[in-house]
Every structure is written in C-alpha cells, then in structure tokens.
Amino acid sequence: MSVWSWVKLTVCLWLLRKAFKAAGWLLLAGIAIAAWPVTLVMGLGYAAAWLRGWPPARLGRAAAATLPVTAVWLLTLAVRIYGGQATALAPARDWEHGWSHLTVPGLTRTFLLLAPTAIPAGLGLAALAWAWRIYAITTGLGGWMASAPITFDARQWKRQVRTARGRIAAPGAVPLLGSGGRLPVGGTIRAIGHRWRPVFTVPFAACARHMVIVGSTGSGKTNLMIRLWAGWFTAALAAARTGHGPRPLLVVLDCKGGPDSRVKANRTRRLLYGAGARRVAIWPDEARLSLWELPPQDLAVLLYQMIETGDGAAAYYADIMQAVLILAVTAPPGPPLNTAAFLDRLDARWLARAWDDGRHPQEAARIRGAARHLPDIQLRYATLLGRLGPALDGPGTLADADAWYFILEGTREPSVAEAQAMALTELAAHGATDPAGEPRAMLLAADDYSAVSGRVPLSNLYERGRSLGIGVQVSAQSWQGLGASEDERYRIAATADGGVWVLRTPYPEPLTGLAGTRRVLETAHKLVGITWGDEGTTREQRASVADPDIIRRLDVGQACYIHRGAASFVQVARPKASPLTLLPAPAPGQPPISLPVPRREPAAEPPTASLDLDDIFGPGATR
C-alpha cells in the first residue's frame, strides 16, 4: 500500500466515523424536537438539578411522585372514551394537533394536554441524564480539561451549600420535631451512603443512645447541641403525652463555665419552655440539689472518691478515711441530710453515741482506732464541701424539674468542677435506677466534659450511661479532647452508636475513619497539551466516605454526620421555638422550680449508762 492510499483510507475512516456520529446527533435532535414537551421538562429538570446541586435521586423521586396523576389521567380517558385503542392514541392525537397550531396559545394548550405523561417522562430522563453526567465527570470520562472532576465537585459543593442555606432560611422549614418522630437538624448539603432528603433528620432513638460531637471554637457546635437537646426533649415529651414512653429528663453539664455558659443556658431554657417544658432549672445560679439524697453506700463511696488520697504511704490514711465515711453515713440514725450534719458526724463523740449501743462492737472498735484521725478528716471535708458551695446542699432532686442545666466552672476552678461533675453524674445515675422514683427517659449531655474528666474519664461516663440505659452525648473541641489516651478516644468514638458529628476541626482523620471507605473509579488519561487524549486506563480505588479535607474547610454551622459507614453533610439550622407555645411559660421573676422543704436531721441516740467515754478517748478527754 502506497502512502497516498494509506492517507485516503485514514481520511475515509475518519469521515465515516464523524458521519455516523453526526447522524446519531441529528437523530437525537429530531427525537428531541418531535417530543418537545418531554424535552422541555427534561431540560428544566436537568438545569434545576445542576443549579441547585440536587442528586439524581431527587429527580427520580419527583418523577415517581407524578405517576399517580398519570394513572388517574389515563383512567379518566378510559372512562370517557370507550375502547383501549382510543385511549392509547389520545396523547398522539393531542401531539399531532399541536403541530398544526404553532402559536404560543396552541403550544401551551398542547403542553397542558400532554403534561400528565410529559412531566414524569421528562423528569425520569433528566434524572438519567444528570446521573450520567455526574458519573462521567467523576470517573474522568467527561469534561474537556484534566481538572474537570475537581472543578465540577467544587462548583457543585457551592451550589449545594447555597441551596441548603436557602432551605433553612424558610420559616418553619426545620422544626424541632418532624414526622415519624424524627429530629430535623438542617438542610442537607451532600449525602454519601445515606438517603438524600432536603431536610436532614435523625431518628429519635439515635439521640436516646450515645453521640459524640467534635468541633473547634466558632464552628457552630452550640447551635447543633441545643437543637439536638430541644428536639430530643420535644420527641420524648410527645411520646409521654400519648402514653408511649416516660417523661423526659434532660441533664446538661456545661463544664467550661463562664459568661457564655449563662447565655447558652438561657437560650436552652427559652427553647425548652417553647417545646412544652414546665420547669427548667439552671444550677447553681437559680437552683440547688441535695447530694445527700443518695443511698448511704453510694454516698459514702462518692464522698471518698471526691477527695484525692494519693498512693504509697497515703494508702493507710485512705483506708482509715473510707472506714470513717462508711461509719458516718451508715450510722443507725440514718444518713446525713446536709453538709453541716455530715461534718458533725465526723466527730468521735457523735459516732460513739450512734454506734456504741452494745449491738455494734466492731464498729465501736473502729471508731476508737480512728479517733485521733477524725479532726484531720473533718477538716479536709469541711474545706472540700466549703469550696463546692451550697449548690449541692439541697434541698432538691433531679425529679423536681424537666431539665437541669449545670454550669461547672471547669476553666476557672478545675478541681472543684471535677468534684461537682462526679457528684452530678452520680445523682443522674441514682435518678435513672431509683426504684421508688418515677421512671424517666434521660439524656445526659456533657459539653466540653474533657475540662473536668481528670477524675471521671469520658470512657467511664459512656460505659456507665450504657449500662444504666441513659443516653449520653459528649462534645469536645478536638479529637485530643475526647480522652487522655488514644485508646480512650477510640473507645468513646467507636461506641457512639447514635452517630458522630464532626464540625470544622484541624484533625478529623480519626473520626472520618469511622465512616470507612467506598469504591470509586479512577481514570488515567493520556494528556495532549492541557486536554485529555483518547487513550487511558480505569481502575477501582478506595476513597473516604467522609472526606477529611472537606471537613477542614467547613463553614460555620456546617457539620458531617457519620453513622453506620455513611456520611451526610448538613447546614445546621439555628434552633427556634414554635411561635405557638404549647403551655404558658412561668411569669418573669418566678423561680423555675419549687424546692422542697429541707428534712430534719436525725439525732444520734444517747449513749448507754454503761458507756465510759474515758475508755474511748483516754483519761481527761471529757473534762
């Protein structure tokens, strides 16, 4: 074969390929023009999905939603026109009639007559076309430039964010409680593995289990947490009113403290009052609790744990202190009812009157052995309880309110806040297991608990909440704030069966790793200049379900929800109460809760006539 023959053959083959391609495009254009009502709907649907950042599934669901109208239309034609053939040919006659009246009124009439079939068909074709476009761009099959996938994804993200923000700005678009008991959170930006919905919701059961929320300062974590609290409370209260569950009890530990905590507490209270709460207590500013309502054994253990005893030589002193606490709390007259009564019991005379009645010889012997240490123990507890203040000295129990907001000054006084956190979590555990109390659906939310987790690690709080049936929600400003060690952090995050919320944070990889990876196609093309050539390869790769680079760039109020190997990016809506309050809120200046009257401290029985105090305390101790 000569060179000229080879050139002519190559040109002919090229022209033949182009002719076939042109014929295909002309045929497609002819079909599009002929079926112009369907083409019009398809173009509008495709353009809307492109501009709004919708997934193809939304167009598909819209097409399926219009099918009942099509069925009713066909049924109506069948009733009006006797015979199935005439019914089937009715759309064709309407289409043919439209070509003879190529005017605006005529085309409008034709479109309206064909709308029952043109709309579902057009939306379905738009969904297919948009799905192919996304597939082609992301796999490298489409686009003119090598950077087309990156540019396409960045533009779609901006459009999706704009759509989500516009959706949550609409009044009433994101209420506190949605249909089916689901809790609306905000507008969906992007869903990977989850079903896409315009408004992202989480089931009520997810909030009733364990959640982790991580986000740096200024990322919008407060709005997300308050919305979840109010949504959970609204759903639990609605279930209680219909007899499908116990009344809710929300317990919030704001461990950071400071003026911002007071603002957050007032926001939470206003929102809960709008949701139907009758009593919302803010501790320690407006309400108090009684630490002494705990069972005697639990109270003794808690008081012992609240004092740092040390190791080594201090272990002997710790054993003596624990024995004294058990004797003081479990004395025959009953447990102490306030701080003053407890401190009075840390006295050799009081303990002798209470225990040395001839029926408790072992306890009396322990008192005689620990008598010289009692002043030191009393001094330590007087100092500790004095620093804790009167807020844990009652009267009051968790059952007195529908929600408690506890403000711990963890930043200003870490040691005091740690002791308070231990006491409050113990009271919550007692409230969940008290057989004499009213059963309550309880959510314990700890905001920045890492500020006070030195004595009670978050992992212990999680494990205890799970065993007691309490939903636990914890937040931190970073991955490192979830625990002191890497094992503890993973134990907390991996057991969050209610989901993990990640807002903007500089180190999201450990959390995004919980979502796993997904299979994607990676296409490599031969580059010709800055455009793609005709040659290349495609292979299967793994990509993160929750892209950590996107999380680093999240704006204020944007969050990623990770649950069961899927991730959804959400624009969180600012929580707002319904304009129609379910029940009237308390009048201004009225206390949010009514505290019970303090009980009287039981007195120790007087010693028996045969009791000689000199035998206990030594000669001259009573003079």
Image (spheres, grey):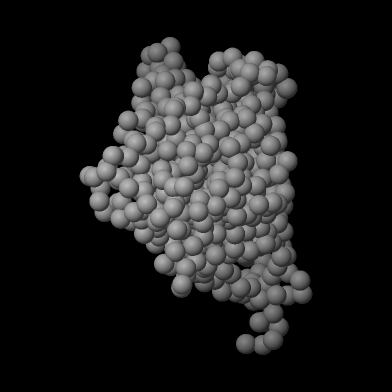
Q: Nearer the viewer, residue 116 or 444?
A: 444
Q: Residue furthest bottom?
A: 2
Q: Residue furthest top?
A: 80
Q: Could you tell me if residue 551 is visible in this image?
A: no
Q: Nearer the viewer, residue 298 or 550?
A: 298
Q: Nearer the viewer, residue 83 or 610?
A: 610
243, above or below 420, in the image: above
Q: Residue at x 47, y 47 (%)?
A: 623
Task: State which quarter of the image contains the N terminus.
Answer: bottom right
Q: Residue 155: where, in percent of width, then height?
A: 72, 52
Q: Residue furthest right?
A: 529
Is 342 situated left or right of 156 in this image?
left
Q: Residue at x 71, y 44 (%)?
A: 258
Q: Could you tell me if residue 253 is visible in this image?
A: yes
| Number of marks present in the image shown | 0
Q: Residue at x 60, y 55 (%)?
A: 415
Q: Residue 119: where, in percent of width, then height?
A: 56, 30
Q: Quadrant of residue 549?
A: bottom right
Q: Residue at x 32, y 30 (%)?
A: 436
Q: Residue 56: where, in percent of width, then height?
A: 56, 45
Q: Residue 323: where, in percent of width, then height?
A: 37, 55
Q: Nearer the viewer, residue 327 or 77?
A: 327
Is 553 situated left or right of 540 in this image?
right
